[in-house]
Amino acid sequence: SYRHLPTDCDVIGGIAAFFVQQEMFEKAIYFFQQAALVQPKEIKWNLMVASAHRRIGNQTEAFNLYKRLHRQFPQNIECLRNIVMLCKTTGEPYHIFQEKLDKLIDV
């Protein structure tokens, strides 16, 4: 299906999900990135890219992507939660992000 219709995000997401299930995160990243190119205003694809980076131990790449996504989508709670979690695990200051997250949750 992907070969015939490489812009179908349902197909791309399904392939990426298969690779995540198989714990082949590098391959999943490629397909999540392809979906992000097809739907650039849909944050979920880039969140999945960042999550896959985190799962292979590439915390820096994940953190940088989450911060970039937060600048693009400042109201996204999932992104902020991941930033706070990564800050806590890496020892980075997280209070500013935690305050933003708390404000969004309270709204």
Image (spheres, rainbow, N blue to C red):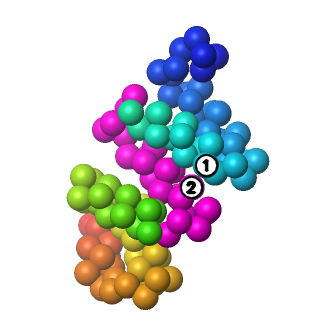
Is disc 2 surrounded by few (<14), some (14 to 19) or many (20+) residues within 10 Å? many
Disc 1 on helix, strand or loop? helix
Q: Which residue is mark 1?
A: 26
The quadrant of the picture occupied by the N terminus is top right
What residue sits 69% from the left and 49% below the top? 24
Question: Residue 59 location in percent, x, y?
Answer: 49, 69
Question: Residue 102 location in percent, x, y?
Answer: 32, 76
> What amino acid is labelled 1 in the image?
Glu
Disc 2 on helix, strand or loop? helix
The image quadrant that residue 30 belongs to is: top right
> What amino acid is labelled 2 in the image?
Ala
Magenta stretch: give its range.
Answer: 38-59
Q: Which residue is mark 2?
A: 52
**Given this view, does label 1 or label 2 mark the residue nearer the observer?**
1
Magenta residues: mostly which secondary structure? helix
What residue sits 31% from the left and 38% below the top? 41
On the question of residue 22 being in view, the answer is: yes
Is there CB contact under 8 Å for labels 1 and 2? Answer: yes
The image quadrant that residue 105 belongs to is: bottom left
The quadrant of the picture occupied by the C terminus is bottom left
Q: CA distance from mark 1 to mark 2?
A: 8 Å
Question: Residue 55 location in percent, x, y?
Answer: 61, 63
What residue sits 41% from the left and 37% below the top? 36
- Residue 47 vertical placement versus 1 (above, below): below
Can you tell which mark lies on residue 88? none
- On the picture, is 6 further left or further right than 93? right
